[in-house]
Amino acid sequence: MAVKARVRGIYSTALSKILLDNGIELVDVSPVIASRLGIDERQGLPADVTVKTENDNPSQIIVLGFPESVEEVSEILEMSIPGLIMFKPPIGLYASFKTRVLGFENRECVVESPLGKALLVDYVDCQPGREVYVSVIKLPIGSNEKLVVSERVRVVGKYAILGRGTGVSFSNFIKNKERVSQLLEISAKYLREGYSIRWRSNADEANLTDIMSEIPELIDLLNEVLSRLREAPLNTVVYEGELVRIYELTYVSKLHLDSVRNKVVPTVYMHHLLKSSEVRDDGYVELADMLTHSIPEDISKTTVLKWLLSKVCEKGEVVIEHRKLDRRILLGKAVVQTISDLDKAKISLKRLVKSIGIYDGINVKKEPGDIITSELNLGRWSLIHRYWSKDGKLKGIYANINTPPEILPSGRVKYIDLETDLIFTESEGCRIIDTDGFRKLLSEGLLSQDIISNVIKEIDALMDEICSATYLNFKT
């Protein structure tokens, strides 16, 4: 039986096209997407997996649902979309296991878990050594985040999430007042019996008979999970819950999704980059899409680039958003010097140094009056910084390996650090540094194969460009 998927968010046309072409059955399809793809809306059918844009980061998509279905959909997306950065938590949402309380740390109750220390909420007490049954309610994405678990064990169905308690709640996507009233009526009996129910979005238009028949099945499943927890060794997962996959869409990913969407409906160059930027609600992208229908592709692309770069010129400076995969963001500002080579959108940046210190990476003295020039190229997998003394002597070069920068109309430049860099100084020549960080990304499976390949190619290109004997001179 085909996996049923619900797709939502700014990438929904392209993602729906990819999944449909690979045998996934789309359900709860919006009227717009159904019309574009020539398929039925399939309203009222429950999804096995949901693919949606992450609320707080429009450059991320989340895939969540029943484990086997998520695995199938994730494999399709990973094979179809280049430039993905992949977060694959090794444990599922609402996964259940037995654990031991460690006690309070920084006023938070801490327990053991299969992923190390976890935060416990909804606890009866936080007595060290106490054994408890828990369900996962929040997954760690960045390296600085902890797993969060609850003492209220839950199980997940197509229409509801059920646990012990006396509460009822609803997905924000259930807006039909009559359906809310019907679900409250169904809930009443089970609330009196000591169960809590969270009604999922699948319950909004589904058949009431199917919804009502699922609750007794979930009660049986909950009792089974509790029985298995009693016999399970500590920190052994006995119930998987929902599998979650999070994908960061890079500049490369978004351009690819543009090409997929363009097979369905006219799509302007950089459509998805702009839709994930601050102009997404201003109507610019929709207007450009409509004009693209009657404008040659090369003229459309050139026009978008000219408009984008003109916006950067108007600002006169850029804000560089240097993102780490542990979710840290380092911000810096630079003055725009020149913009050239429209195809590559080559932007030269300049910063004036005002403090004393040591330049990270190249370990060269930083002095007031120094100038840092940076070279930013659209589509390139690095950002090259050159450090100059106030009298024009080159102090060193630092090439940061990163995902191709996204240049936004606001003047913000975004990229993700890939944890390896190439440097040059007069005393030490060329060196590749921070390779331990890159190896860690590889070991954690965060990078798609094409990203790894592009990093290797970029290092080779930088070696030729920066480290060649003809280049290595320290003249202005």
Image (tube, rainbow, N blue to C red):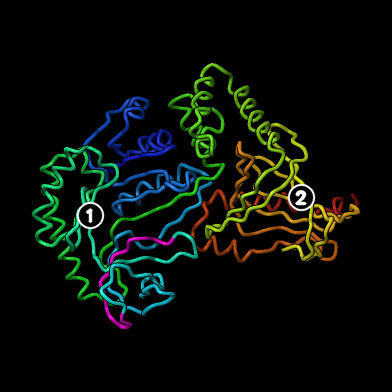
Q: Position of residue 51 (x, y in %)?
A: 37, 44
In front here: 407 or 95?
A: 407
Tell me if residue 394 can be seen.
Answer: yes
SS label for mark 1:
strand
Within 10 Å of the Cα at label 2, are there few (<14), some (14-19), or many (20+) other Cα atoms? some
User: How many numbered callouts?
Assistant: 2
The picture quadrant where one finds residue 164 is: bottom left
Quick one: which residue is furthest to the top in this view? 294
In the image, is residue 177 above or below residue 297? Answer: below
Residue 473 falls inside the magenta stretch: no
In the image, is residue 129 above or below residue 360? Answer: below
Q: Position of residue 258 (x, y in %)?
A: 50, 33
Residue 130 falls inside the magenta stretch: yes
Label ID, residue 161:
1
Name the quadrant of the N terminus: top left
Q: Amino acid at mark 1?
A: Ile
Q: Amino acid at mark 2?
A: Arg
Question: What is the C-alpha distance between the residues marked 1 and 2?
Answer: 53 Å
Q: Residue at x 53, y 38 (%)?
A: 278
Tell me if residue 474 can be seen.
Answer: no
In the image, is residue 13 above or below residue 329? Answer: above
Magenta-drawn segment: 127-140
Q: Position of residue 189 (x, y in %)?
A: 8, 54
Label ID, residue 34:
none
